[in-house]
Image (cartoon, grey):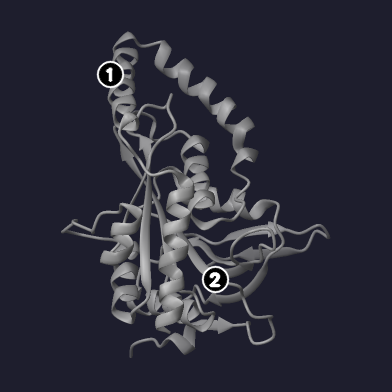
């Protein structure tokens, strides 16, 4: 017997005040989040902000707990608890920004992907989101000494044209992120997939510079403060560790120099400013509201 959304999704948003121009952000730890970059970016974004939990997905039907093990921990009173894999939806209100945000910073499930992605669509529709942005990170030929570029794709031709995004071209085995984008497309919700590069030669390190690049891009386009500057101390610390690992190897140093030259050539090409991107997105979303 297949699961239904109502069996696994708890909704808590009946009593909250209406949201202002909400957009949903989704990051899932798993195949398309190398180094945990996308989920750590949202962790930083939420760190200094008040938020309200508005829904959650029951983990029990979706996980093989021999792979994604729950954790036992002691609280401040010494009582023992179990922490299960969480997929909570939270709302952040931005009175100083252009809109409010609905955020899912969770874990990619092992099974029942169809029901899981339908649950995300249910929340987006229930809270009136006109756009869903999925965040990810991939191992790429990018130098650790430069700010990595953020690239995006969408199946919406109008939005692709406005923001200079590509249409998805990948064919082959996919993950929950790919299934989610297909489900959003079928439901009529506009979606954008954003991906940041992680230096493939340092895959097992942490990459706060990549996380900050994602947050800065979101701040430019969405008109919300993402507090990406708070990552500067972590960026400096990991830059020193990355430099030390590369400087001790002449061949690796030469390879990084080659990547730097190629990266700089790409950046020199004409690219739309953050203000231009934000204005185009606002115009697109206004059109979505008028259609509704």
Q: Pinpoint residue 225: horizontal percent, then vertical percent.
A: 62, 51
Q: Pinpoint residue 26: horizontal percent, then vertical percent.
A: 46, 62
Among the two numbered marks 2 and 1 on one chain, the one whose residue lies closer to the N terminus = 2
Q: State whether residue 34 is above or below residue 248.
A: below
Q: In the image, what residue occupies the spot 40% across and 55% down? A: 30
Q: In the image, what residue occupies the spot 19% across and 56% down? A: 170
How many dots with numbers?
A: 2
Compare residues 3 and 238 and report the one nearer the observer. Answer: 238
Q: In the image, what residue occupies the spot 29% across and 79% down? A: 186
Q: Nearer the viewer, mark 2 or mark 1?
A: 2
Splitting the image into 4 quarters, where does residue 71 fall?
bottom right
Q: State whether residue 196 is above or below residue 49.
A: above
Q: Which residue is mark 1?
A: 258
Determine the secondary structure under disc 1: helix
Q: Which residue is mark 2?
A: 22
Q: Residues within 10 Å of mark 2 (few under 14, many from 20)?
A: many
Quarter containing the C terminus: bottom left
């Amino acid at each position: 017997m297949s699961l239904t959304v109502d069996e696994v999704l708890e909704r808590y948003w009946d009593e909250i005040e209406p949201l202002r121009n909400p957009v949903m952000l989704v990051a899932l730890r798993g195949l398309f989040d190398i180094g945990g970059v996308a989920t750590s970016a949202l962790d930083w974004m939420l760190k200094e902000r008040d938020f309200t939990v508005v829904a959650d997905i029951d983990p029990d039907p979706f996980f093989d707990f021999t792979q994604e093990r729950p954790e036992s921990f002691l609280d401040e009173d010494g009582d023992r608890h179990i922490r299960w894999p969480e997929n909570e939806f939270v709302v952040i209100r931005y009175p100083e920004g252009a809109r409010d945000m609905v955020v899912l910073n969770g874990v990619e499930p092992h099974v029942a992907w169809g029901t899981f992605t339908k649950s995300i669509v249910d929340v987006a529709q229930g809270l009136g989101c006109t756009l869903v942005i999925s965040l990810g990170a991939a191992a790429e030929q990018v130098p650790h000494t430069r700010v990595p570029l953020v690239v995006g794709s969408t199946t919406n031709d109008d939005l692709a044209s406005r923001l200079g995004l590509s249409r998805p071209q990948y064919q082959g085995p996919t993950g929950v992120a790919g299934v989610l984008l297909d489900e959003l497309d079928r439901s009529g919700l506009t979606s954008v997939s954003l991906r940041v590069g992680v230096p493939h030669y340092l895959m097992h390190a942490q990459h706060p510079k990549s996380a900050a690049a994602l947050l800065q891009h979101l701040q430019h386009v969405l008109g919300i403060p993402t507090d990406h500057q708070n990552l500067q101390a972590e960026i400096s610390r990991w830059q020193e560790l990355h430099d030390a690992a590369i400087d001790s190897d002449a061949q690796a140093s030469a390879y990084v120099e080659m990547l730097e030259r190629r990266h700089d050539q790409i950046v020199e090409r004409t690219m739309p400013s953050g203000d231009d991107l934000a204005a185009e997105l606002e115009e697109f979303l206004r059109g979505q509201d008028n259609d509704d």
